[in-house]
Amino acid sequence: MRRRSAGTPAARPLPRPGAAAPGKVRAAVAVLIAACVAVSACGAGSPRRGGASPAASPSVSTAASTPGPLATTTAPALVTTPANCPVTSRHDDGFRAATASSGWELAWLDDAPEETSLRAGAATADGALWALFVRASGAIEPRRWHGGAWRAPPSAPSSQEVRALGAASADRAWVVVTADGAPALTVWDGTAWRATPLGLGAYTGAGPVAAGPWLALSTGSTRWDGAAWRSAPLPLHVNALTGPGDEPWAIGFADPMDPDASSALARWTGAAWQSVPVPALGLPPDAEPVHADQGRTVVKSVVRTGPQEWWALGSFQWMEHEHMDGEDIFPGRSVALRLAGGTWTCVVGASWPDGWKGFTAAASDGRGGLWAVSVPDELWHLSEGRWTRERPPVRRGGRASVEDLVARPGTGELYALGSIGTQPYGEDSRAALWRLRP
């Protein structure tokens, strides 16, 4: 029997992925720190537009700090109106996406003699773009886009054990590397890479994940605030972080021992992480599930498109028995879940017979819409309630494989990271970067 965890892509050739003040000055500093922590804790659980205020401008700390946590508990779960999601035939397509000509440009294509790819992008407010560069050997290293080329800062970690990348600026980035099965944090401070305590505990499911100034592992998270790392507990076991640094969303599972369950969601309110219930989707009436399977919703990305509007994108999958060869297969449908004013609505696409499709990475278009990756060489755009799809440009008759979408803060400019080959994720693939200008 062919069995694969729901929401897991088919195997690919590339791995997926100071000193304390003396005397009275010391006492004054302690009082000031305590007051600041108390103020930051006020209003826990009270959402506001945009989540937390933007973090202070990143800088290299020159004095020792003993910061308090971002939060010590999680907020009460968000109360939402359950979605009235349509239960339609597996052949019905709620998106009705029209084909459009591409507005994307191919900004860079690797000319290395070996298979390479880009993934896990991070764009910062000062214009920096970071990503993980993956080689055919399996070595993964952080690189920064500078002067029209990707450059690895001196002595950048390069190993198969690099698991996550985050960044706050051109001079402040970090990677999480697993060493002897335990996660270790290595930080670029503008001059060198330095080992830094992570303080997030051990694995209880998926590995470490990052987004902007945030890192998360298991049920813990931590954020770089410009001077120090500050922690906050999560109400789920995280396997992805998504969204901008001031209002990230965490995606994961309520139970890490049940990877076939529907995704769980949590959002940062500005004071604590808050669970957000995921609407239940039903099987198509013409589905033929086996093993009493009721299907599962797999969320891959969450994007804010308005002051109180978000879209959660992914797929709905279930298990059927293939009649020709007698194996279990995993059909599914693309899903876009809209949360506006506390109410969920749903858009579902026509089903595919087996394998991984659905939406993966997504990012805001900066104008109240969003972009999302569907099949590896298609980019979908939601603008003013209308869905369109287009293919990013390629060279030499190749096919694109888009791994990640990244919005450059405050500009409306987007980047797509991945590779180009004669087939998606093929052995002749070369790392590629696309750009969409506003």
Image (cartoon, rainbow, N blue to C red):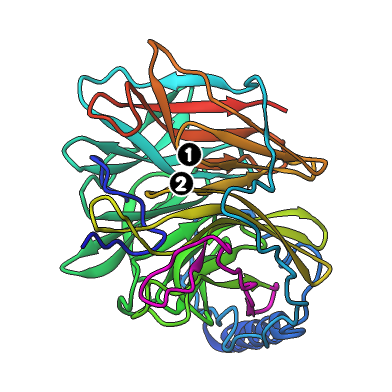
At x 46% / y 17%, what residue is drawn?
394
The numbered disc on residue 102 is none
Relative to residue 360, is residue 72 depicted above or below? below
Predominant secondary structure, magenta span? loop
At x 46% / y 59%, what residue is drawn?
210
Classed neighbour count for the residue bearing mark 1: other residues with Cα under 10 Å, few (<14), some (14–19), many (≥20): some
Q: Are marks 1 and 2 in contact (CB under 8 Å)?
A: yes
Q: In which quarter of the image is residue 285?
A: bottom right
What range is drawn magenta here? 269-298
Please state which amino acid type lies under the numbered disc 2. Lys
At x 63% / y 82%, what residue is drawn?
33
Depth check, front residue: 96 or 47 = 96
The numbered disc on residue 375 is 1
Q: What element carries label 2?
A: loop
Relative to residue 164, is residue 339 depicted above or below? below
Horizontal and vertical percent for residue 25? 61, 82
Q: Quadrant of the N terminus?
A: bottom left
Horizontal and vertical percent for residue 436? 63, 27
Q: Of marks 1 and 2, which one's residue comes earlier in the chain?
A: 2
Depth check, front residue: 316 or 39 = 316
Horizontal and vertical percent for residue 79? 75, 82
Q: Does the magenta stretch include residue 287?
A: yes
Please name the residue that numbered disc 2 is placed on.
357
Q: Is residue 148 magenta?
A: no
Depth check, front residue: 48 or 394 = 394
Depth check, front residue: 278 or 137 = 278
In space, the residues marked 1 and 2 are separated at their CA atoms by 5 Å
Q: Is mark 1 on a helix, strand or loop?
A: loop
